[in-house]
Amino acid sequence: MPGIVGIYPFGLGRENWRMARFIYYGLLALQHRGQEIASIATFDKELHIVTKKGFVDEAFNEEMINSIPGFIGVGYVSPSENNRPIEIHDPVGLILIGDGRPNIEDTEAEESWKAFAEILSEEIDRVGDALKGALNVIEKVEGGYSFIALTERQELIAGRDIHGVKPLEVGSLGFDLGAVASESAALDVLGMEHIAYVKPGEVVKFDPYSIERARVKGAEKAQIKYCSFEYVYLARPDSVINDIPVYSVRENIGRLLAKEMPVKADVVIGIPETAIPFAIGYSKSSGIPMSLGFITTGRKVRTAIKPSVFERLVGVQLKLNPIKCVIDGKDIVLIDDSVVRGTTLRNTVWNMKRKGARRVHVRIGSPPLTSSCPYGIEIPPPDELIARALGEEDIAEVIGADTFSFLSVNNLSKAIGLPCNKLCMACWGRREK
């Protein structure tokens, strides 16, 4: 689930822009999509790329940002140190960043983007036009992906696979700058107007004086497959993805959870931060008051994508400290976005009961997570997914909850506002033939 952003200046004097700082702030807005490495790449007579481990504000200090030249830029954050931007020098020099997984025969996941970059470079050189070349590549390469490429020809090219699995949004700052990013929130943070999304099978090309857009032939007839996990967990709640506001989806999930799996309780609590909108919706629908149940400590850590058990447990303890006066002696509806292994949720329920909670009824704002993602989201192997082997009553016993329930697949579809066949739901075990 990497986060990608690209920014392009237009018109006379565009060489005066210092784009590294803009990319830096865009990456801060996308930090939740990857916390292991961060990259900034720019063009100024030649391509420059700097990749560092860790959080964006740790990887790039003031001195480093000021040292990166360039008036066109792209940036990348990743939850894996193995996933890095690809730099190609022949025949067309380019730097490519991507989210998802192109399906290229005889390549492993880590190598698929390198192969994609090579195909793109060769195709651009063959047809002599970046837009046509990128369209040809999308026609050839299946999978679920979005990408941004910066070329030595001073072009910025962005595109999505024909099914639109991975998101990509477009924005502008007047007539001065154009931008693309994984989420609209990154454009908001940069002070840009969010103007559209890149359609499935579409390529957007920025050159010094214009933006060109074109779609693969027949793309409008292809079955769209937007990633449902984006709306449940990956995206920021202030983002709009594919013209669908993420916050509205999450509040809808809470309302539907309350109707599908009601329970008598004194208070509704959402686990920060993704599940807070779920809890608001649940409270509004059920009439059970909502309270702040936890205080976070330190940096925001997305424990579901931390690489080791120890780091996940420490991350939960740092992230979630229960507020005793809110939960002591109460029956609680505890809302979370998803359950992976169940380890961190068990720790959370135990801490709440240790602080005096009488009963804890866990409600999950998504269906059971039972399969790995075919498009690159860092979901553990199926044999580590608790919902693959256990039903709701068994999970309740394992995590120490009094009751436990998932949202149904149909209600997730209803919350997003699209039928199931227009959503990728592979991680919930629903694979279309």
Image: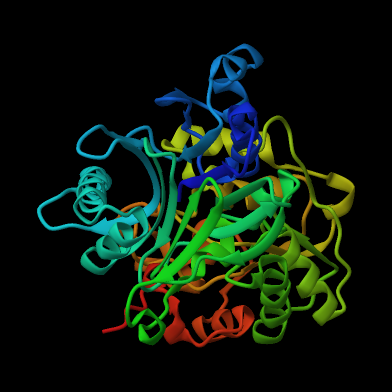
Quadrant into which the C terminus falls = bottom left
Q: Is residue 361 visible?
A: no
Q: Quadrant of residue 30?
A: top right
The picture places residue 28, in percent across and down from the top left corner, at 64, 37
Q: Is residue 1 visible?
A: yes
Question: Quick check: 195 left or right of 121?
Answer: right
The picture places residue 158, in percent across and down from the top left corner, at 44, 54
Q: How is the image coloured?
A: rainbow
Q: How many marks?
A: 0
Q: Residue furthest top?
A: 63
Identity of the residue drawn at 10% across and 53% down: 106
Compared with 112, 382 (above or below) is below
Q: Quadrant of residue 369?
A: bottom left
Q: Nearer the viewer, residue 19 or 161?
A: 19
Identity of the residue drawn at 37% across and 55% down: 100
Identity of the residue drawn at 55% across and 84% down: 418
The picture places residue 181, in percent across and down from the top left corner, at 56, 51
The picture places residue 356, in percent across and down from the top left corner, at 79, 50
Q: Nearer the viewer, residue 254 or 50?
A: 50
Q: Residue furthest front?
A: 12
Q: Nearer the viewer, residue 4 or 44?
A: 44
Question: Quick check: 252 left or right of 204?
Answer: right
Compared with 400, 42 (above or below) is above
Compared with 126, 11 (above or below) is above
Q: Nearer the viewer, residue 13 or 271?
A: 13
